[in-house]
């Protein structure tokens, strides 16, 4: 990816959402499974989806004008409703793009919430999604104070959530091979940043030649692109849409 659009992430170590690495399912199939009768399967699928996408939704709700407490409650309720009503079974899949589907779904949800007078606490007292309110609002408070619309902030946070998934998947692969320290030193080269440690110094630390380190960086970048491609493929119905979605991702990050 072009270096100038790879912003440094604040939360590299937060839990990943879907169990990626091999990307065994699409977000559509995951959400469909969540709407099935098996409550354990539904909760597991919900947790995976929310782990990746709760913050883009929260940021959208906040930018739409809701205070932190209401935004947390609304985000909680949105994902609960997403599962309970099995939106996938009853909704055209927004031209096959999960990103668009989720944004349209939360917009419809907020409109319906404004029209509905609730007699009891949102969610009926049952929390299907555990949100870290302090983390959510701390992250929102460092969002740019500008004219960025709710739609725009959703798109950018969705893009960063996807990149987090990819980076976490790549980290897991190195950790499984016992190379987490090497990954931590090499990941700066993914972004094209100036690393505090040179490739020659990394080679000395791990008993590798500088050329071997350069080859490792090349493989790291190649694997990152593979995982990014597969992560995007998870979000569309037709694989022919992957390249278009990747271009959209890049335009959002560079805009």
Image (spheres, grey):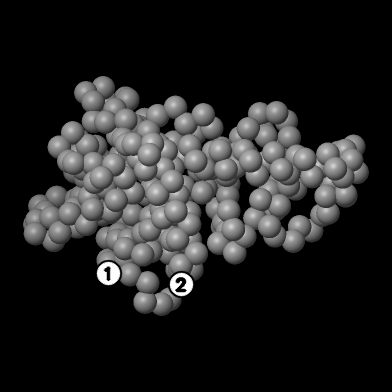
Foreground of the two, 107 or 245? 245
**Residue ID at (54%, 38%):** 227
**Residue ID at (25%, 45%):** 95
Q: How many marks?
A: 2
**Farthest bottom residue in view:** 146
Position of residue 62 relative to residue 31, above or below, is below
Badge 1: residue crowd in 10 Å (few <14, some 14–19, many ≥20): few
Residue 57, by quadrant, is bottom left
Foreground of the two, 234 or 165? 234
Position of residue 141 relative to residue 222, above or below, is below
Going from N to C along the chain, the mark reached first, 1 or 2, is 1
**Residue ID at (65%, 44%):** 221
Name the side, left or right, on which 255 lies relative to 180. Answer: left
Q: Position of residue 245 (x, y in %)?
A: 40, 49
Q: Position of residue 123 (x, y in %)?
A: 21, 45
Position of residue 107 relative to residue 235, above or below, is below
Q: Position of residue 186 (x, y in %)?
A: 73, 47
Q: Which residue is mark 1?
A: 65
Q: Is residue 150 visible?
A: yes
Q: Which residue is mark 2?
A: 144
Residue 88, by quadrant, is top left
What is the secondary structure assignment of the residue under circle 2?
Answer: loop
Q: Position of residue 255 (x, y in %)?
A: 46, 67
Name the side, left or right, on which 251 lies relative to 226. Answer: left
Foreground of the two, 206 or 85? 206
Position of residue 213 relative to residue 132, above or below, is above
**How far apart are labels 1 and 2 at the CA level?**
15 Å
């Amino acid at each position: 990816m072009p270096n100038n659009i790879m912003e440094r992430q604040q939360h590299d170590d937060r839990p990943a959402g879907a169990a990626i690495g091999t990307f065994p399912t699409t977000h559509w199939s995951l959400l469909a499974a969540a709407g099935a009768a098996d409550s354990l399967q539904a909760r597991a699928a919900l947790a995976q989806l929310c782990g990746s996408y709760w913050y883009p939704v929260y940021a959208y709700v906040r930018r739409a004008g809701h205070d932190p407490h209401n935004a947390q409650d609304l985000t909680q309720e949105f994902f609960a409703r997403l599962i309970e009503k099995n939106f996938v079974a009853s909704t055209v899949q927004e031209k096959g793009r999960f990103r668009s589907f989720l944004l349209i779904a939360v917009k419809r949800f907020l409109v319906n919430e404004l029209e509905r007078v609730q007699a009891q606490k949102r969610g009926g007292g049952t929390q299907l999604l555990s949100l870290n309110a302090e983390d959510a609002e701390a992250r929102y408070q460092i969002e740019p104070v500008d004219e960025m619309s709710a739609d725009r902030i959703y798109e950018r946070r969705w893009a960063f959530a996807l990149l987090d998934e990819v980076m976490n998947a790549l980290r897991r692969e190195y950790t499984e091979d016992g190379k987490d320290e090497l990954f931590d030193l090499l990941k700066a080269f993914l972004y094209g940043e100036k690393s505090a440690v040179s490739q020659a110094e990394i080679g000395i630390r791990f008993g590798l030649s500088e050329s071997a380190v350069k080859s490792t960086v090349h493989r790291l970048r190649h694997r990152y692109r593979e995982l990014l491609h597969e992560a995007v493929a998870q979000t569309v119905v037709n694989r022919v849409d992957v390249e278009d979605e990747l271009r959209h991702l890049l335009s959002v990050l560079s805009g």
